Image (tube, coloured by chain):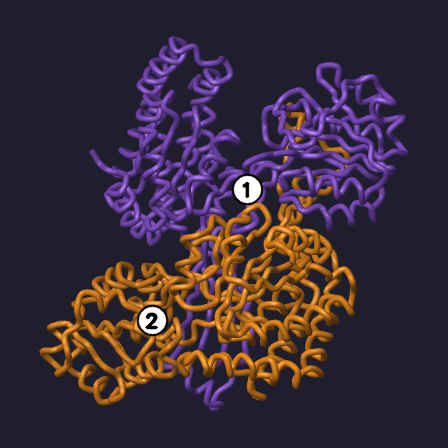
Chain colours: A purple, B orange
Amino acid sequence: MTTMKQAARSARQAGRRLRTMPATLRDAALRAVARRIDDNRAVIQAANARDLQRARDDRIPQPLIHRLRLSDAKMEAIDASLQEVTAAPDPLQRVQAARQLDAGLTLTRVTVPIGVLGVIFESRPDALVQIASLCIKSGNAAILKGGSEAAESNRALFDCIQAALVATDPRFTGALHLATSRDQIDDLLRMDDLVDLIIPRGSPELVRSIQDRTRIAVLGHADGICHVYVDAAADLEQAVAIVTDAKTEYPAVCNAVETVLVHAAVAGRLLPRLREALPQVELRGDERVRALIDVPAAAAADWDTEYLDLILALKVVDDLQEAIAFINRHGSAHTDAIVTTDRQAADAFFAQVDSASVLRNCSTRFADGYRFGLGAEVGISTARIHARGPVGVEGLTTYSYRLQGDGHLVADYTGGARRFHHRDLPAPPAAGGGKG
Amino acid sequence: MTTMKQAARSARQAGRRLRTMPATLRDAALRAVARRIDDNRAVIQAANARDLQRARDDRIPQPLIHRLRLSDAKMEAIDASLQEVTAAPDPLQRVQAARQLDAGLTLTRVTVPIGVLGVIFESRPDALVQIASLCIKSGNAAILKGGSEAAESNRALFDCIQAALVATDPRFTGALHLATSRDQIDDLLRMDDLVDLIIPRGSPELVRSIQDRTRIAVLGHADGICHVYVDAAADLEQAVAIVTDAKTEYPAVCNAVETVLVHAAVAGRLLPRLREALPQVELRGDERVRALIDVPAAAAADWDTEYLDLILALKVVDDLQEAIAFINRHGSAHTDAIVTTDRQAADAFFAQVDSASVLRNCSTRFADGYRFGLGAEVGISTARIHARGPVGVEGLTTYSYRLQGDGHLVADYTGGARRFHHRDLPAPPAAGGGKG
């Protein structure tokens, strides 16, 4: 059996091979993966059926079973996602900046893979395919750890991916590893010399527990406590529609709204309409809210809670500044929105709200890699370092500086014989165009 | 006395004020700092004289005393550095990307400050001014901890900076804090809820010890084990000059070369010339080197040592691939150079060497923020996340996404009533132009 250390060393070696492979080869490998998974659908679904049977025997809650199931629709979504990742522009070898430092001395900054990623995800086996494809697309090696409840599904999918990669080119050997036992997570989190970035995909509890246990950088968000602030100058019909969408369109996700702040000037008109529009939602309010509509009182803890459920906290504020201060204090710097027709209020909100995504006159649910046009989403980050907010495949890259000279020596510059002129050059267009 | 926690909370508050201040105000504050330091030169140098006296009494080594001394020349360099930072373009509010997601739904990605920085530096008091000015320029609050041997100099400089900031605008109150005792470092490193990035400036030992003690992201490099590989197709005269510059121009810095790899085909001609060009350098070689020139044997540990001194390890390799594998194994991914006239060899070296800065036909000493044209240097990072290589003020920023809509709801897209068209827009030119 391979230890986690051996896996990580093998991934480091493979990562060095991956970074030099042309995009055509990485894309060919992804097409082979899609074909192999399609050819083995029966085998994969049979493995999934065994996981589902065990889950039922273990009386695992229904929502988890739903996420575990690889229905025909899910298999088609896996295929569509693979096609999308394959078709996306190459995130590597992009020239981010070019500068002539002096005659004959030219600097470029070029995107390269990060190296070795550790990805830890929960029950959904389709996440394995998505993250594996994003790693290959971006030239990163990875160690993948899925949930034990999906062990057989993950193994079947991983075997397909592995076989397709190595059949495409033997240099893919070692690029991806599947960790299967929970103990291996601790080993993985300790290897800060061999693993460059940890990506947890799952519950806030999972993310927090991983952040607590590793010195490796973690790309993830612990909480999504998102706000909608309805300003004095809001279009109230728009406000009701936005809050409804942000709360009810998919309440169990991180970019759903948890707290609505209402300017005192419109509270009397807005709150009754909100209550009417959200019969299925449990509203909780502060005293000023409860003076206007009959809802239970919000406790202090409500303002710091990610409900992930059909519950919504309501608070009346006196002005924009109180709303901004409240959001910066109680929010999780994930996604916050203002509803207003007042351009100045919106500008102040954009400038002062300290969140990864700040929105005006639209639903918080838009804060998502696919909707933002970043392609397949790696995750949403509330970190302030490296990638922030919705992260596409670009977040799996870093850069290196490349300097070409012709015998240039620093002594000539420190001695005054030569001087830098630092002239920016137009960056050549990225091969294949692209976004982000 | 203010606890570190109080200081960090005050910095967080101040940081929120800083991020909304216009560049003109931040630049005005920097000009006031320069004036105040100039007006108080006698006071500052008197404080420095007391530090120097104590250092002599404590028999602190001469190089440390040299770094501690605020000579007239150093005071002028401080002033010049302040002018340079003030004149640099604003790193904030730069639109990095703009995209129309659908009619009336427009996304931009805009640079914002990181938030609160913790900066830990050793004896040089001029570092305090440089890092403080970079923080103000980039709208970040900071907690600064200088070396105890420079306590009086740091206090005098900090008092000038503080007074100048608050006189410019009282909203700067709390933006910068000076920590004075060593215990406070541990407090600082524990506050991952209030401090967003730690920047250690000093010895590799300092950086490593900090990385070992904190969960906060650290921007720094633990080692600079840099290589020059002299290829079969090298211009040997150029190679000798580059190695001489990279080793001797300033041996005590991280971008000095520590190991030279020589292709076997040119070793017989190059090595005697290198020995002749570097009489002041202690050369150590592997067996194949010692068959050609009479130098002491390099031990296994030599290949993993950052000498920071006039010592150079030499090794003969059979080909480019051996050189690349050696560098990826023994280097610290800081800066590595190839000397070659062969374009294909250079391209392979650029593609495969996994370092923050990869150079061709020039000295490793060029890997530096100022020389790269990044403006004042925050540090050099060997991390693979966030900023990498030489880091300018851009490395003290992150970004936020801003989405403007007109009542847009996600349900319309998931329900199929509307579709995203994701059309990239030209990013407006940054105010003030600029680099990086």
Residue flagged by tag 1: what amino acid is it?
Ser
Which label sits on residue B282? none
Residue B101 horizontal/vertical position (percent): 65, 40
| Residues at marks 2 and 1 touching, judged by CB atoms closer than 8 Å | no
The answer to whether A200 appears left or right of B143 in the picture is: left
Instruction: Please give the residue where the numbered disc 1 appears in the rendered image.
Output: A381
Instruction: Please give the residue where the numbered disc 2 appears in the rendered image.
Output: B337
Q: Quadrant of the C terminus of chain B?
A: bottom right
Q: Residues within 10 Å of mark 1 (few under 14, many from 20)?
A: many
**Front one among B241 and A9:** A9
Residue A147 horizontal/vertical position (percent): 39, 26
Residue A321 horizontal/vertical position (percent): 80, 45
CA distance for labels 2 and 1:
35 Å
Let me know if marks 2 and 1 both belong to one chain.
no
Residue flagged by tag 2: what amino acid is it?
Ala
- Which chain is home to disc 1? A
Compared with B405, B169 (above or below) is below
The residue positioned 27% from the left and 88% from the top of the image is: B280
Q: Residue furthest front?
A: B57
Q: Is label 2 or label 1 in front? A: 1
The residue positioned 73% from the left and 72% from the top of the image is: B164
Compared with A358, B238 (above or below) is below
- Which chain is home to disc 2? B
Q: Quadrant of the N terminus of chain B?
A: bottom right
The picture quadrant where one finds residue A230 is top right
In the structure shown, which secondary structural element does the residue marked by tag 1 occupy?
strand
